[in-house]
Image (cartoon, rainbow, N blue to C red):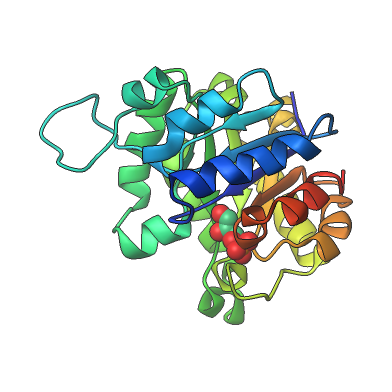
Amino acid sequence: MRKNIVAGNWKMNNDLPQTEALIVDLLKQTQTSNAEVMIAPTYVNLYQAFDATRNSNIEVIAQNMHFAENGAYTGEISATMLKSVGVKTVILGHSERRAYFNETNESLAKKVDAALKNDLRIIFCFGEELSDRKSGNQEQVVENQIKSALFHLEASAFKNIVLAYEPVWAIGTGETASPEQAQDMHKFIRQTLQNKYGENTAQDVSILYGGSVKPANAKEIFSKPDVDGGLIGGASLKAEDFIAIVNAF
Ligand code: 13P
């Protein structure tokens, strides 16, 4: 079922006391909402965040994971480790992981398989660079990212997949895609899914937008028919701003 989702990607921000303080602030303000609310703290604070949000409407999710079940991968975290601290959803394919940690469409396909095998829901991120948009190749780039990491899956797998379109040129830059640019791309993404998996699957998948979403622009972006929510970076670090974005629904 297609759902509205607002997820905060905290990236490499907030130590343990800051994590606990931000959650206290969020809990004061998010009693009810028309969207699923998620936060993605750093790995080392996942359990404390999970514990602090028990019985609330905030889901604690992870920012990444390795594709192997376990073994000699120093510094890495597996799906079973995430599950053991209460995590049910993992972000995969963020452009920062692709750019700084050499994640490729091929390695992401393996992570996707490992997450699904372990019954984790995935927020799968992709998006074009500024140069792609300038040369008019944004749809081709996005289509390739989606196809190479996801199109080996059965349609039924998409029950556990949320897509997040994050144009790289809009992340942390203050420059947002216009609501029309977001809608055009989300419609293209849904059509790409429909061509492969049929209308029911395409209509059921939630597609989030990410890239400089703020309280001031959230409502207009979320009002677009193919935009089902947002993946929020900078603005998710301030309770007031994040809640205002959640309440844009
Ligand atoms: P900003 O909201 O800071 O642009 O970051 C978006 C993002 O990368 C979320 O994953």
Residue 167 in the image: above or below residue 5: below
**Residue found 41% across the figure and 27% down from its top:** 115
Frontmost residue, 141 versus 33: 33
Using the image, determine if residue 228 lies above or below residue 202. Answer: below
Is residue 78 positioned above or below 19 on the image? above
139 on left or right of 177: left
8 lies above or below 212: above
Residue 229 place in picture, x, y as percent: 75, 45
**What quarter of the picture does the C terminus occupy?**
top right
Name the residue: 44% across, 23% down.
116
Residue 138: image location, x then y, percent: 59, 67
- Count of numbered circles on the image: 0
- Identify which residue is drawn at 52% across, 79% down: 131
Residue sitting nearer the eye, 146 or 238: 238
> In screen coordinates, is 90 left or right of 72?
right
x and y, in percent, of residue 183 in the image? 79, 57
- Residue at the left extreme? 72
Q: Quadrant of ligand 1?
A: bottom right
- Please say whether residue 128 is visible from this viewpoint: yes
